[in-house]
Amino acid sequence: MIVVTGATGNIGRPLTQALAEAGQQVTAVSRHAAAVPDGVRHVVADLAEPAGLKPVLAGAKALFLLLSGDLHAAGANPADIIGEAAAAGVRRVVLLSTLGVVTRPSGQTRIAMRALEGTLRESGLEWAILRPGGFASNALWWADSVRTQQVVAAPFGDIGVPIIDPADIAAVAAACLLEDRHTGGVYELTGPEVITPRQQAEAIAAALGSPVKFHELTREEAKAAMSQSMPGELADDTLDILGSPNPAELRVSPDVEQVLGRAPHTFADWAARNVAAFR
């Protein structure tokens, strides 16, 4: 049995589906009740209380570990989840980390994530670590304005990074959970090309078959909007990356193709598959 945390999110949903289609017994874990594929067991649990995971992990052979935002906060101890997994007899853990642990290692959340990577490496379990960059699904922030105003509003319109389709992260995670050859692997996951917000708006317009305007926000306007759903410090951190990506953040990684034997999906692929969100 394989346990998938964050099972109702942009990565967890396709990962759960892929594992179920591969004939695996899957336990999908999320904080709230949700629909899951036929044959998948769903459990409501809070990763902030690792001791409560004991019955979830009992009998599991592998765990996909995706941390919710509060588990990055001061005082959280996600290392306890790895301890619970080991105590339950879980053999393999695949951890969703972040590319930021190598591209901007001094940030507080990245320091904590790097420490969690270290805990996993030293746990005695089989492990693999996934380090994705920015997600294509962040474009869903624009869905309402595209639906109602045919506008994408974003800062730094002509500065891009190689964002990744979450479905590709899920596919790599499935491979790492199922294939022994990925044990001890650390994979940096990006899309196939650098793409700017303006180009993303063009791709959404192409998927819709109708015009979408691009409106460039100032950094201050963008921070005000982002701060409604995240701490101001994290908003600043994100804007630093979007506005002035360093060479490591601009690098197109070969790791998706190395694991999957195919190129990662483009943003246009993602937009076409998710076009209903923008209608």
Image (spheres, rainbow, N blue to C red):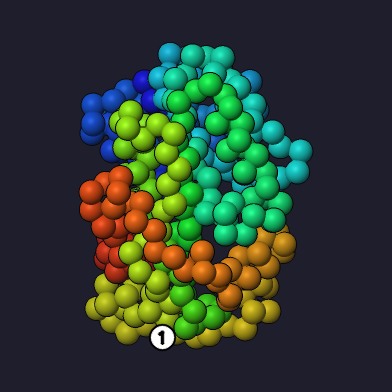
Query: Which of the image's four quarters has the C terminus?
Result: bottom left
Does residue 59 appear left or right of residue 70 in this picture?
Answer: left
Q: Total label count? A: 1
Q: Where is the N terminus found, in terms of image quarters?
A: top left
Pick whichever, 84 or 270, lies toward us: 84
Give the structural element (helix, strand or loop) at label 1: strand
Q: Give the quadrant of residue 75.
A: top right
From the viewer's perspective, tell me whether residue 24 is left or right of residue 236: left
Residue type, label 1 = Lys
Q: Position of residue 101 (x, y in %)?
A: 59, 51
Q: Nearer the viewer, residue 230 or 108?
A: 108
Q: Report whether residue 218 is seen.
A: yes
Q: Tag 1: Cα neighbours inside 10 Å, few (<14), some, or many (≥20)?
A: some
Quadrant in the picture for residue 162: bottom left
Give how far across and how far down residue 221 sits, in percent.
65, 79
Residue 91 vs 214, above or below: the answer is above
As rendered, which of 5 and 278 lies closer to the eye?
5
Query: Is residue 160 or residue 210 the one in the foreground?
Result: 160
User: Disc 1 marks which residue?
Assistant: 213
135 on left or right of 270: right
Task: Provide residue 66's location: percent of width, then percent of height.
Answer: 51, 40
In this picture, is 248 found above or below 63?
below
Is residue 247 left or right of 11 when viewed as pictured?
A: right
The residue that appears at 50% across and 23% down in the rendered structure is: 125
Residue 191: image x %, image y %?
Answer: 36, 61
Vertical comparison of 77 with 196: above or below: above
Residue displayed at 53% across by 45% down: 97
The answer to whether residue 55 is seen in the rendering is no
Q: State the residue lying farthest toward the right.
A: 75
Q: Residue at x 33, y 37 (%)?
A: 174
- Residue at the location (56% across, 14% down)? 87
